[in-house]
Amino acid sequence: MVKDRWWLAVLMIAILGGTGCSEEPGANEASSLQPGEEVYGQFCFSCHAAGIADAPKFGDAEAWKPRIAKGPALLLRSTVEGMTPGMPPRGLCLDCSDQELADAIDYIVLNSQ
Ligand code: HEC
């Protein structure tokens, strides 16, 4: 009986071996991120990439022009406080510092003009 199942053991070893640590070192990638890009990618992206709920779209210069004209201080304020009904306070990144939020805004703005 058991003798017939040698292949099962081989298969198991192959599978376990295959799930080993084959990850590429990501250090280079991480350091090439622009400031704010990570927060954007984790939080802001979900609405601003596709323009959900009328969010000004990432990269849409027309949509961002009047927002950018308010100046960075006001943009930070509306991000921290949120804008009813669409924009949640802190863009949902409740653990973000004001600086991290400002970086995320900069990241969007720099890529949307
Ligand atoms: C749940 C969806 C959602 C998420 C998540 C979100 N936003 Fe927004 N955001 C909106 C919407 C909708 C508006 C437009 C609000 C309006 O004009 O009434 C907006 C507007 C803005 C504005 C323009 C504010 C102004 O004064 O005109 C900025 C800046 C902004 N978001 C930054 C961010 C940042 C930074 C993040 C991530 C930390 C983020 N948003 C995450 C939906 C979202």
Image (cartoon, helix red, strand yellow):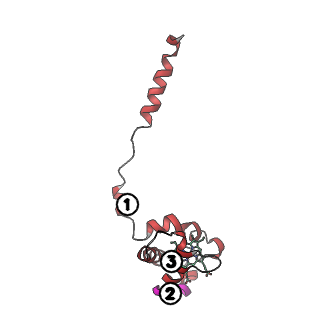
* Residue position marked by numbered label 1 in the rendering: 30
Q: Residues within 10 Å of mark 1 (few under 14, many from 20)?
A: few
Q: Which residue is mark 2?
A: 74
> Which mark's residue is nearer the viewer, 3 or 1?
1
Give the CA separation, mark 2 to mark 3. 17 Å
Q: Residues within 10 Å of mark 2 (few under 14, many from 20)?
A: few
Q: CA distance from mark 3 to mark 1?
A: 22 Å
Rendered location of residue 21, percent (x, y): 39, 41
Whichever of callouts 1 and 2 sits on the residue coming sooner in the sequence is 1
Is disc 2 placed on a helix, strand or loop?
A: helix
Amino acid beneath label 3: Ser
Task: Work out whether residue 1 can be spotted.
Answer: yes
User: The magenta stretch spans which residues?
Assistant: 65-74
Reply above or below: 13 against 45.
above
Q: Nearer the viewer, mark 1 or mark 2?
A: 2
Which residue, as the protein is rendered here, is positioned at the far front?
95
Give the image location of residue 69, x and y in percent: 51, 89
What's under tag 2, amino acid-wise? Leu
Q: Nearer the viewer, residue 78 or 17?
A: 78
Q: Specify the amino acid type for callout 1.
A: Ala
Q: Earlier in the sequence, mark 3 or mark 1?
A: 1
Res. 59 in view: no
Q: Element at badge 3?
A: loop
* Label 2 or label 3, whichever comes before in sequence order: 2
Horizontal side, residue 37 vs residue 28: left or right? right
- Residue visible at 46% across and 75% down in the picture: 101
93, 67: nearer the viewer: 93
